[in-house]
Amino acid sequence: LQQHGYQLKATRTGALGIAAAKAERPDLVLLDIMMPDMDGYEVCRQLRADPRLASVPIIMFTAKSQVRDRLTGFEAGADDYLTKPTQPGELLKRMRALLARPSDEAGVVTAASESGRPAPTGDQPPSPVGRPSPYLTAVLGARGGAGATTTAINLAMGLAESGYDTTLVDLDFYQAHVGQFLNLAVAAGLNALADRPVAEWPSQLGQSMIQYEDRLRLLLGKPNLDGRWPIFSAEQGAALADRLVEQHAYVVADLGHALTPIHQLFLARAGQLFLCVRPERLAVVAARSLLQGFKSNWLPGRALHVLMLSFGENLALPQAAVEETLGHPVTAFITISQPEMAQAVNRATPLLRLRPDSPAAGHFRQLARQIVKRET
């Protein structure tokens, strides 16, 4: 590591390691499990309990290779897990991937995001009530950057290219990622509807949509981080969900990664939910909290799918350990390479159009077929 320019601080015991970490707040911790005073799991728990160290990446480095040992490491707070003997090249690759992760990706899950929106937590689980529609699909990210918008766009595209009238609605009223991803100028859209009473919507809803392809329409809003545009009330959110479903077209709703009252109203009417998770510890922990809340309130007749999306990370978590942590099976593991994703963003093109024969496109088409199969 020193030959590659890293500055190191080494200790011989867990207690000394904790003291050194608190004193210096390192960029990354390499943590053995078998140590003379306390094991690495306990060291990891204590590091995570310190707010200043809660987001510092931790790689556990040990001879233990059983799934249950890995699971214990992830539950204690490890970001990655390497078994001995490990090649130096692999260690460097894992370290670089963690160190390159954006700082907001490494932050702990809190009750509010920087924009003031409620972030997903297990303390206030959503309470879906109402009549689910098989035509309405909700897509939610366990955390920011989990791939919810990518999933929503390609699910909607998959339904449309199969010959079904589909509406993709962007319910992230602050960042409006769908329009930005597709590089579309939104004249009014959701913002115009939010500024009008529900009674006037019949003449406005169709005019607020963008015809993207023959079978695909988009209902989008403008980026609204500064709060200059109106957003929906709960009454308007419920009315929008009902009006969209009444059109007898498939509806895919991108909920972003927040759960506002409006999002919960859409969830109350959704026949299926796709929860998107990145292959990293904090995302899995956040997804587990969400799933616990959903399962305690989830009504019969609704499908709950977990998608694990990887965007070129080298941090593949073992499937068995992930599913045991979540307490729920993973429907699909979808890998999208960084060059592929960058090309899709730069060209403002869904993956199903950019790389129609790619494995990721095949996954999204299969998921779209599952939506149709449930309805029929």
Image (spheres, rainbow, N blue to C red):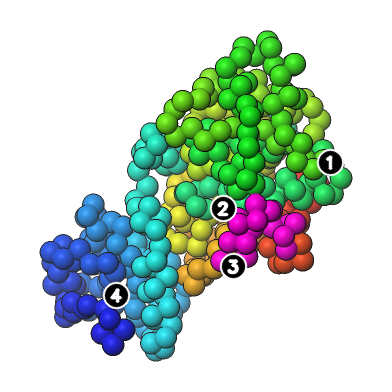
Q: Element at badge 4?
A: strand
Q: Tag 1 or tag 3, which sits nearer the N-term? A: 1
Q: Relative to 158, does residue 60 appear above or below in the rendering?
A: below
Please name which of the two marks, 4 or 2, marks the residue nearer to the observer.
2
Give the Cα distance between marks 1 and 2: 25 Å
Q: Tag 4 or tag 3, which sits nearer the N-term? A: 4
Residue with the mark numbered 1: 214
- Residue 23 sits in quarter: bottom left
Please name whichever residue, 187 or 167, is drawn nearer the observer in this view of the structure: 187
Task: Tell me the chief SS of the magenta region.
Answer: helix
Please name which of the two marks, 3 or 4, marks the residue nearer to the observer.
3
Please name which of the two marks, 1 or 2, marks the residue nearer to the observer.
1
Q: Relative to 225, does residue 325 appear above or below in the rendering?
A: below
Q: Tag 1 or tag 4, which sits nearer the N-term? A: 4
Relative image position of residue 57 (x, y in whole percent): 33, 65
- Residue 137 sits in quarter: top right
Residue with the mark numbered 3: 339
Within 10 Å of disc 4 (Cα), the crowding (few <14, some 14-19, many 20+) is: some
Give the Cα distance between marks 3 and 1: 29 Å
